[in-house]
Structures are given as structure tokens and as C-alpha cells.
Image (cartoon, helix red, strand yellow):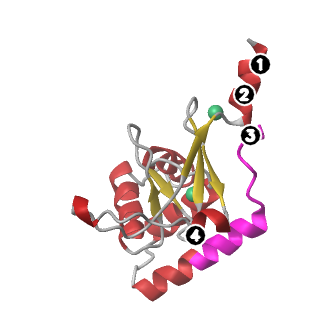
Amino acid sequence: MADPSQPHVPKRERARRLEAARALCRRKGVVLTAPRALVLEAAIGLGTHPTADEVHAAVHRKEPGIGRATVYRALEAFVAAGVFTKASHTGVAVRYDAIPARHHHLVCLRCDRIIDLFDGGLDGVAVPDVSGLGFSVTDIQVQLRGLCRACQTKEEEK
Ligand SMILES: [Zn+2]
Ligand SMILES: [Zn+2]
């Protein structure tokens, strides 16, 4: 069933992301073994900031011999090489993000859904001086929190 609040990633865009991720793997020296290639394809196919378990479930449907630990190690290798990022959402399982380019997230407080937001204005947000806290900032990502469309609909039905 189509998920109304998770914009469907068109097939062509998925193919483009997969090709870009493969090229990035080559540049970064990440060897795409058969299991890793499946993990890459599954994670990009899900497109919804999947957890390791969700990626494993998708891989498992195609190749039941691949275990959860293999999937987890592959995802971490992609993160280490900058092919994926981690969409941090504290308190729940790590969500992997197949888009390494700068973007922001709409996070649903009810169902934990993460929706990508590309916004030049947010990209330019000035980083405050936090050197006094002994912290070195390497990146900035804005999280807008609220209710997704599906959860708003449920709210109205009550
Ligand atoms: Zn929701
Ligand atoms: Zn994202």
C-alpha cells in the first residue's frame, strides 16, 4: 500500500542514487562484495531511512543466507566511507540514510517516520560559537518535529 506521507521515490531516482552510491564506493575503496551490493540496493530501495533490521528483512527476501551481522557490518562500512550517513533520532534504533548530500529531516513524533527535506535556507543556518563547550562542529542538520500526514489524519478521526 502506498504510504501517503512518505513521498514515493521514483524508480529513476532510485537508480540514480544507486549508481551514485556505487561510484562513491569505488572512489572510497569500499569493495562491493555480493552481500554488500545487496545491502546497498536494499537500503536505497527502501528510501525511508531504514533501520538495520528493515534492511536485513529486505535483503533476506532476496538472499535468505545473509545474516543480520553481515547487513549491519555492510551498513557501518558505508557510513565509515561516507556513502551513507546516520540520521540520528535519539532513543530508537539507528536509521541509515542513503543520501550523503546535505539535507534536513521532518521527524514524526508519533510514528518515527523521517521525511527528507532539501532547503537551501536551512543549509545556510549559522553555526553558533560552541568552542567554549569544547565541541568541534563538523556538520549541521535541522530536524523539524511534528506529525506526518497519516498521523494527523488519525488525530482528526478521533
Ligand atoms: Zn507519523
Ligand atoms: Zn535523509
Distance between the alpha carbons at the discs numbered 2 and 1 = 6 Å
Respond yes or no on whether mark 2 lies under 8 Å from ligand 1.
yes
> Disc 3 on helix, strand or loop?
loop
Residue located beneath label 1 in the image: 156
The percent coordinates of residue 59 (x first, y second) are 52, 53
* 154 in relation to 60, above or below: above
From the viewer's perspective, is the residue at label 3 or at label 4 nearer? 4
* 78 in relation to 70, above or below: below
Residue located beneath label 2 in the image: 152
Residue located beneath label 3 in the image: 3
Distance between the alpha carbons at the discs numbered 2 and 4 = 30 Å
In the image, which residues are magenta?
Answer: 1-20
| Left or right of 79 in this view: 117 | right
Residue located beneath label 4 in the image: 124
Asked whether the residues under the numbered discs 2 and 1 touch, taking CB atoms below 8 Å apart as contact, a structural biologist would say yes
Distance between the alpha carbons at the discs numbered 4 and 1 = 35 Å
Asked whether the residues under the numbered discs 3 and 4 touch, taking CB atoms below 8 Å apart as contact, a structural biologist would say no
Quadrant into which the C terminus falls: top right
